[in-house]
Amino acid sequence: MTTPGVLRAAVAAALVLAVAGCGEREPAATATEPVVTREGPVTLVDGEVLLSCGGGPGWVASTMAEGTTGVTPRAEIEAALDEVATDPDLRGETARVLPQGGRTPWKLLVEQGDQVVLALGDWTADGPARDAMTMHLERTSDGWRWTGHGNCWTLGPVLDPDTTWVQVNASAAVDGDATEVTVDVNETACTSARDPAPFLDEPALVSSEESVTVYWTSQPPVGGANCPGNPTSQQMLILDEPLGDRPLLDGSRWPPALVGQDE
């Protein structure tokens, strides 16, 4: 299975075209620019977390259920998928995931510049089914080029290239009256089994009436690293106020995962 390399995530503006009617011509509509903000290391687009499977342009959760509409006509993408499915150099990679070529059910997750990311299989706003995939295509001077496909088991918020996600958990239920919580952290990238503690960034906490979400990152290794398994480090998480009845969530995954066990 092949996955695309990591690309800088961004958000493409949606183009709204005005239709000229009879008589006086309507003025052309302007592009609708999304509102992009930050919560700690996480990017929000119109209030929704920007997500990806670890590489490529990002998308928001609401597009995973129904898909979105891009600039490229659907028929053009279907024709590109037909070529991908029948290319003798690619069939070994793509035949299983595109059994009907361009008529294989798919939806557009994002179109950014010359790149599109498609969802194959069953997807909801919570993410893909276990056997669902993404497929990446890139427009070239000769048409569309397949750049990879793969599962989306690592679905999570898009990060800047100089940081990696740390997963947060706890072996017991979190005390709702405490402001100091002992948690276990694990780096998600290959780190040659280093001790994560010296490389951890400060955690970011986002509180609402319903929950408190912790976003924790670390600095990636310099140079190459192998993957023998990353050690767990026990850390003290300082909360701004007691949780009360609210759950503590790990924001490195989508949807955010409960930290600790249910009481």
Image (spheres, rainbow, N blue to C red):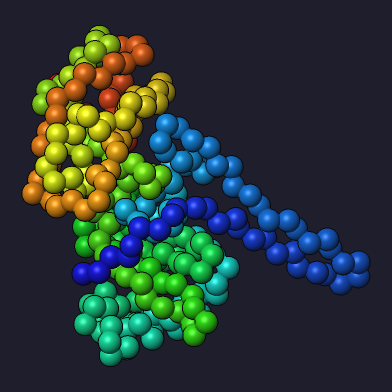
Residue 250 visible, this orientation: no
Q: Residue furthest top?
A: 177
Horizontal side of 145 relative to 172 (left or right) equals right
Q: Which is more toward the observer, 148 or 197?
A: 197
Residue 28 visible, this orientation: yes
Residue at x 45% of width, y 53% of height: 9
Q: Is residue 37 above or below residue 107?
A: above
Q: Which is more toward the observer, 127 or 162?
A: 162
Name which quarter of the figure residue 149 lies in.
Answer: bottom left
Name which quarter of the figure residue 2 lies in.
Answer: bottom left
Residue at x 27% of width, y 87% of height: 89
Percent position (x, y) of residue 8?
A: 44, 54
Q: Residue furthest front?
A: 223
Q: Is residue 240 above or below residue 257?
A: above
Horizontal side of 137 relative to 202 (left or right) equals right
Percent position (x, y) of residue 169?
A: 18, 30
Horizontal side of 85 relative to 182 (left or right) equals right
Percent position (x, y) of residue 54?
A: 31, 53
Q: Which is more toward the observer, 169 or 174?
A: 169
Residue at x 40% of width, y 23% of height: 207
Percent position (x, y) of residue 128?
A: 29, 56
